[in-house]
Image: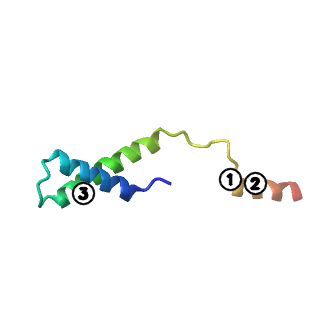
Amino acid sequence: MYDLEQAVRERAYHLWIEGGCQHGHANAHWLAAQREVLSASLSKASEQPLATNAKSPRKAAAKKKKSAV
């Protein structure tokens, strides 16, 4: 399972390094990292195709009722 918090932590650390290791900007680094990681995660999720062939439980139950009547 993908751990979002760990990904944000690692990205915030890299942002801190890229920013010259200056202290006092932890919140800004964390929020920027969070924004980047969540944005990347959402774009990756939107690229995945939805399962359209899967039968829903409601349709299967309705089909059973029709055949029983």
Mark 1: amino acid: Ser
What x and y, as percent, mark residue 17? Answer: 19, 48
Q: Is residue 49 above or below residue 29?
A: above
Which residue is more in the foreground, 4 or 41? 4
Label drawn at residue 56 = 1
Which residue is more in the foreground, 43 or 53? 43
In three-dimensional space, the C-alpha distance between marks 2 and 1, rounded to whole angstroms, equals: 6 Å
What x and y, as percent, mark residue 3? Answer: 43, 56
Name the colour scheme.
rainbow
For label 1, the crowd category at 10 Å Cα-Cα, with few meaning under 14, some 14 to 19 and many 20 or more, is: few
Q: Is residue 31 visible?
A: yes
Contact flag, marks 2 and 1 (Cβ < 8 Å): yes
Q: Which residue is mark 2?
A: 60
What x and y, as percent, mark residue 30? Answer: 24, 57
In three-dimensional space, the C-alpha distance between marks 1 and 3, rounded to whole angstroms, equals: 40 Å
In three-dimensional space, the C-alpha distance between marks 3 and 2, rounded to whole angstroms, equals: 46 Å
Foreground label between 3 and 2: 3
Q: Is residue 69 visible?
A: no
Mark 2: amino acid: Ala
Which residue is more in the foreground, 66 or 3? 3
Compare marks 1 and 3 and give the one earlier in the sequence: 3
